[in-house]
Amino acid sequence: MRIADICTHNPIHIAASASVREAAGMMRHRHVGALVVLGAENGNRAPVGILTDRDIVVSVVVDGVDPDTLQVFDVMTREVATCGEDQDLFDAIGTMRRDGVRRLPVLDAAGELSGMVSADDIYGAIGAHLSELGQALTREQVREMGLRS
C-alpha cells in the first residue's frame, strides 16, 4: 500500500516567521497536533521544519515564555523526517520507528509537501485490511460448510 493512498492531502502548514501563538491558534482551529513549516523562498513548498503541540508545551508553556515573542522558527524541529508519496506503508513505519516520530510530511517527486501521514492513518489502514482478511476467513468457513452439508 502506498502512502499517497492513506495520507491526508493538503496538510496544514505555516511559515517559520509566524508567532507561536498564531501556530497554536491554527492547531486549535484546525484540530491538528502538528504543523509543517514551509520554506518561503520562491514559493518553495519544501518542509524546513515541523512544529508539534508538544514542542509548544515543552519549549514555551513550561518555561513561561510569552508565545507572542517567539516565532515558529525558534521552537520548531528542524530535522524533519519525511516520506515519499510512492513509498510503501511499511517503509514509512520504519522511518517513524527509527526517528521516534508519529507523523511524517509526505513529499511529491519534486520534494515538495503533498500530504501528512500519521500513526493513526497507518493504524486505520492496517486495521481495515485485517478486517477484510477476517471477513475472507469467515466466508471461507461458510463456503466450506455449504460444500460439505
Image (tube, rainbow, N blue to C red):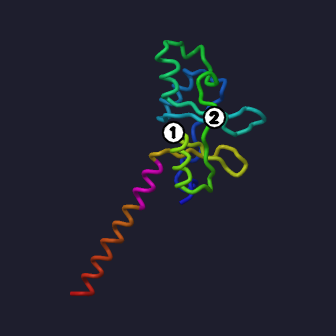
95 relative to 131, above or below = above
Taking the spot 30% from the left edge, 71% from the top edge, the residue there is 138
110 relative to 27, above or below = below
Q: Residues within 10 Å of mark 2 (few under 14, many from 20)?
A: few
Residue 33 appears at what percent x and percent y? Answer: 49, 34
Residue 108 appears at what percent x and percent y? Answer: 67, 50
Residue furthest out toward the right: 42
Identify residue type, mark 1. Answer: Gly
Judging by the rendered image, the residue that carries numbered circle 2 is: 79
Residue 66 appears at what percent x and percent y? Answer: 54, 13
The residue nearer to you, when weighing 25 against 124, is 124
**What residue span does the magenta drawing correspond to?**
121-129
The residue nearer to you, when weighing 99 against 138, is 99
Q: Quadrant of the C terminus?
A: bottom left
Alpha-carbon distance for marks 1 and 2?
A: 12 Å
Identify the mark at residue 132; answer none if there is no mark.
none
